[in-house]
Amino acid sequence: MKKETIKRHFRNYKISGRKSTISHAFFASALSIPDAYNDGDINKSLKILGQNPSADLTCAYCDAPANTWDHIFALVENGNFSGNGHQLFNLIPCCNFCNSKKGNLDWKDYLRDYNLDSAERLKRIDRYITTNSNNALDDIKKYCKKEIKELDKIKNQIFELMKAADGIAEVVRKKLKAKMHKSIKADK
């Protein structure tokens, strides 16, 4: 690590910069119906990936030891719930490197970008997804229009409050900065 990397910490933090956190809370976490843990389903799915469910799992993307689970599909797209949540089809064993590098990239694009897109790997992951797939977005749009509209309204109100909070925080920083400069001049 270079000393210059500290620069990223020497900047003002914006409360409104956390919109993705709010979107995740309002949509991905709140609306996603997680699958129940079912040992049989998980074992079957892991076998589709070429994994031994009784052994330590490996990253489905690169074969390194897995130490986390990646959401294959983003939970939030364009600030809204994608319909993909904490379901078996959307969770895949992964190493920290791949989880971090993939981010919100499409899983096929990630594999291609890192030359991990062997025909066999693509086939296994695609089969894993399609065997377990259950995207809830169509049902949400069909049966919950009123509730989604209300959630979106509340989310936008929170975003406006976050902007207002940024304004207040800026005033506080300016006052503190002015006070600090007066103290420094008095010490001289």
Image (tube, rainbow, N blue to C red):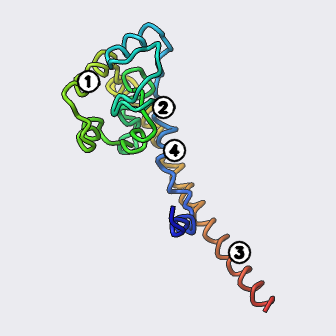
Quarter-of-image position of residue 69: top left
Residue 121 place in picture, x, y as percent:
25, 27
Q: Nearer the viewer, mark 4 or mark 2?
A: 2
Above-or-below relation of 154 to 11:
above
- What residue occupies the far left of the structure in this picture? 119
Q: Which residue is mark 3?
A: 176
Marks 1 and 4: which is nearer the front? 1
- Relative horizontal placement of residue 45, taking residue 188 as reference (left or right): left
Tags 1 and 3 touching, CB below 8 Å: no
Please tell me which of labels 1 and 3 falls first in the chain. Answer: 1
Q: Is residue 117 left or right of residue 7?
A: left
Q: Which residue is mark 2?
A: 68
| Helix, strand or loop for disc 4 | helix
Q: Position of residue 87 (x, y in %)?
A: 42, 22
Q: Nearer the viewer, mark 1 or mark 2?
A: 2
User: Mark 1 or mark 2, which has the lower sequence index?
Assistant: 2
Residue extending farthest to the bottom is 188
- The Cα–Cα distance between marks 1 and 4, rounded to whole angstroms, is 30 Å
